[in-house]
């Protein structure tokens, strides 16, 4: 049969079922010293693996052929073998004589030698040694060969990024720890190697199960490694990173704090641990368990590393690792505290990163672009620049294309685009922008039905509600407002406890309810709006920063509306108290909003209850608002209008010429800020001109000249 194949007389003879059955029967009884039979069986299996179309049969026959040729070649070195097997058999011969001491030296040489051939030869040799050790049942050296082989496979993956190497390394290392003599005692390094390989695959694939398995392996490793062991620090670091990726952020912060304390002072090693700890604090600040100081700690740690004087090449690597995290942390702190220096620093860092070649940003270009778009959306709220919004929209549009790089989340791109379109509509009165924002909001809500994450769906519903309520203010659509209320109500109901976006989502619900109450006198809406604003104040208080002050202003506005409808003294008293508390909390650049509310609420309280001290305080507050707001601010005209109305009210009470002159000047200046009034949209009642609170409402029924827009951001953090 073998001769028939070799001479070409019958090349299919090796494929017949009876031939395979006969060969299997011979394999069961053949002796190692029967070289003629062993050699014939080797050639049979070699020929069969050539001809079979069954890949499993081919692999099995090839391995049997290698084993048989190895036996024959050792007994008779002149035994003819296929040329293709010569290198494999030479490696097997070398592996058979390999000792554990030789194997450890081989691993050290392969790690130190950058030549790829040295590493490949070592991997092949250890694979052969592990296989040969398996021929003897219970061979105590086999787990050691497995561990060293898996270790070098992981090293080769880190050099070449071949995923097959990493997957095989995890399989081999898992088999090694499962067979560790006497359990994990004394084998902490093995578990550390398995944990690192699992961590690398988690970073590559994002498989959550790998995070949990890595945490378990690394905890076992640390339990059996002495703190003086050279591998203890890197294993402790890997455990901190694995905990971070698994979402166990409290444990990650605790673990990485210990690692930073143990790292050599003033070294790049310490800096790397500070980056990891800063990352853990940054991640935790956006969770229900987070606290305001987490964000400040993250900025402090990351700034220290980013601005530190480190030796090359560590300096470049550390700056590349910290730049995206630090920029994102500064951006979040700006949204919390309103300090424009943080926004400027974040933008500079992102633009510098985007100017680098692709290799320097390590595939993160898309993430940098999305962050820049978010920064531009926030900046235009201070600059009033349509150009900023145009650039932001252009960036996120490019990221929606299939060829976009950087691994950005589609949901994040969609959220930023919706916000940018809504804001551009507010500055330009573009109907196409607000219609598209609504359409994209509906798309985001549909996508969130698939993900099933309550926090993400809550955010999507909020964005759709925000777009709908803004469109209703242009079109007068009752349907849009009703839908906005439904979307925002569901968004609030889905909020996880302590969610970082809770203040802005409560604010959208209050905005929709307040608008429906004002435009359509929907019963109960003002009470519901007040309740939503109270929820916003509570959630904003937990996050710290200036968000609490802005929430207090908006609650005061809603209470002032309800007072004008129902006349409850408690509402107007609380509105005044909230305005004063917000004035004390707000940054100078934002304080005009609280002062403006104080002027309106005090004036209303005087009109209804007649205390002259309230009227004097109202004039003082409105004057301070007009003096603190930039003259190119988009709300400057409304602040002047409220000041003029308050001065006129005091003139009617005290009949002082100075008050009426000041009122005329203020109202004349305010009138010049607005274009002629267009007819009210269908369904919207015309508001009386002397209702003071209309100056606080964003009246967007007609286009306004472009001005710096300092409205507080409604962007979720």
Image (tube, rainbow, N blue to C red):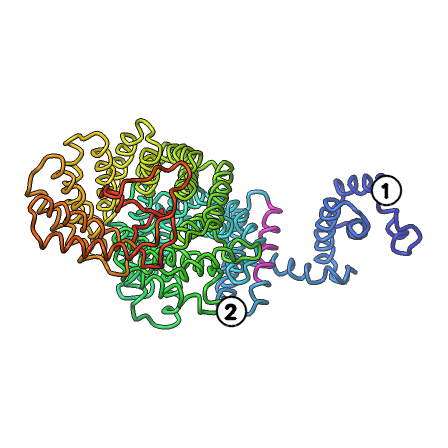
Magenta extent: 122-136
* Above or below 210: residue 313: below
Q: Is 619 inside the magenta-drawn segment?
A: no
Classify mark 1: residues with Cα within 10 Å, few (<14), some (14-19) or many (20+): few
Identified at 40% across, 71% down, the residue is 313
Judging by the rendered image, the residue that carries numbered circle 2 is 113
Identified at 50% across, 54% down, the residue is 407
**Is 511 or 168 nearer to us in this picture?**
511
Can residue 291 be seen by looking at this rendering?
Answer: no
Classify mark 2: residues with Cα within 10 Å, few (<14), some (14-19) or many (20+): few
**Is 192 or 81 nearer to us in this picture?**
192
CB within 8 Å, label 2 to label 1:
no
**Residue 638 on image: x %, y %:** 25, 51
Identified at 27% across, 66% down, the residue is 266
The quarter of the picture where residue 573 lies is: top left
**Residue 701 on image: x %, y %:** 38, 47
């Amino acid at each position: 049969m073998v001769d028939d194949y070799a001479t070409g007389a019958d090349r299919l003879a090796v494929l017949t079922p009876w031939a395979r059955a006969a060969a299997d029967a011979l394999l069961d009884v053949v002796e190692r010293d029967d070289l003629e039979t062993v050699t014939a069986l080797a050639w049979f299996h070699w020929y069969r693996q050539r001809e079979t179309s069954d890949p499993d049969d081919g692999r099995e026959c090839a391995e049997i052929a290698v084993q048989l040729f190895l036996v024959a070649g050792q007994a008779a070195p002149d035994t003819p073998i296929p040329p293709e097997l010569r290198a494999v058999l030479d490696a097997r011969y070398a592996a058979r004589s390999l000792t554990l001491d030789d194997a450890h030296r081989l691993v050290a040489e392969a790690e130190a030698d950058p030549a790829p051939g040295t590493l490949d030869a070592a991997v092949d040799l250890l694979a052969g040694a592990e296989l040969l050790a398996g021929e003897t049942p219970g061979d105590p050296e086999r787990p050691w060969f497995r561990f060293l082989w898996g270790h070098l496979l992981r090293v080769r993956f880190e050099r070449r990024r071949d995923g097959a190497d990493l997957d095989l390394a995890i399989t081999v290392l898992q088999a090694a720890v499962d067979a560790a003599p006497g359990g994990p005692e004394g084998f902490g390094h093995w578990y550390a190697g398995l944990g690192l390989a699992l961590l690398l695959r988690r970073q590559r694939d994002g498989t959550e199960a790998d995070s949990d398995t890595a945490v378990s392996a690394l905890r076992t490793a640390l339990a059996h490694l002495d703190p003086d062991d050279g591998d203890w620090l890197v294993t402790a670091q890997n455990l901190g990173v694995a905990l971070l990726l698994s979402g166990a952020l409290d444990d990650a912060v605790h673990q990485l704090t210990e690692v930073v304390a143990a790292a050599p002072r003033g070294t790049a090693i310490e800096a790397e641990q500070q980056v990891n700890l800063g990352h853990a604090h940054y991640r935790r600040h956006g969770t229900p368990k987070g606290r305001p100081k987490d964000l400040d700690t993250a900025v402090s740690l990351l700034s220290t590393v980013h601005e530190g004087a480190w030796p090359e090449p560590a300096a470049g690597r550390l700056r590349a690792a910290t730049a995206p995290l630090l920029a994102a942390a500064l951006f979040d702190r700006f949204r919390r505290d309103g300090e424009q220096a943080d926004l400027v620093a974040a933008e500079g860092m992102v633009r510098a990163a985007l100017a680098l070649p692709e290799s320097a940003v390590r595939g993160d270009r898309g993430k940098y672009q999305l962050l820049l778009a978010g920064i531009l959306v926030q900046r235009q709220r201070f600059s009033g620049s349509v150009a900023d919004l145009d650039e932001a929209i252009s960036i996120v549009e490019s990221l929606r294309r299939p060829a976009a790089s950087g691994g950005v989340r589609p949901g994040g791109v969609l959220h930023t685009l919706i916000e940018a379109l809504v804001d551009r509509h507010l500055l330009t009165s573009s109907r196409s922008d607000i219609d598209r924002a609504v359409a994209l909001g509906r798309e985001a809500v549909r996508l969130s039905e698939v993900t099933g994450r309550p926090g993400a769906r809550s955010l999507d519903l909020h964005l759709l509600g925000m777009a709908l309520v803004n469109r209703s203010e242009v079109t007068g659509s009752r349907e849009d407002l009703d839908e906005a209320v439904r979307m925002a109500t569901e968004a609030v109901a889905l909020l996880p406890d302590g969610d970082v976006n809770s203040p802005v989502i409560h604010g959208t619900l209050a905005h929709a309810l307040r608008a429906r109450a004002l435009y359509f006198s929907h019963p109960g809406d003002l009470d519901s709006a007040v309740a939503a604003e109270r929820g916003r104040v509570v959630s904003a208080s937990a996050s710290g920063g200036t968000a609490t002050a802005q929430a207090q202003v908006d609650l005061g506005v809603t209470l002032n509306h309800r007072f004008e409808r129902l006349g409850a003294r408690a509402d107007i008293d609380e509105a005044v108290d909230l305005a004063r508390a917000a004035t004390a909390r707000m940054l100078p650049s934002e304080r005009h909003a609280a002062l403006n509310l104080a002027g309106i609420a005090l004036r209303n309280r005087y009109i209804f209850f007649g205390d002259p001290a309230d009227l004097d305080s109202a004039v003082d507050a409105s004057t301070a608002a007009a003096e603190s707001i930039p003259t190119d601010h988009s709300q400057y005209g409304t602040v002047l209008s409220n000041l003029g109305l308050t001065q006129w009210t005091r003139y009617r009470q005290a009949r002082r010429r100075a008050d009426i002159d000041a009122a005329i000047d203020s109202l004349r200046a305010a009138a010049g800020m607005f274009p002629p009034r267009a007819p009210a949209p269908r369904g919207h009642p015309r508001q009386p001109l002397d209702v003071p609170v209309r100056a606080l409402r964003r009246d967007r029924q007609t286009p306004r000249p472009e001005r710096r827009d300092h409205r507080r951001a409604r962007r979720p953090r």
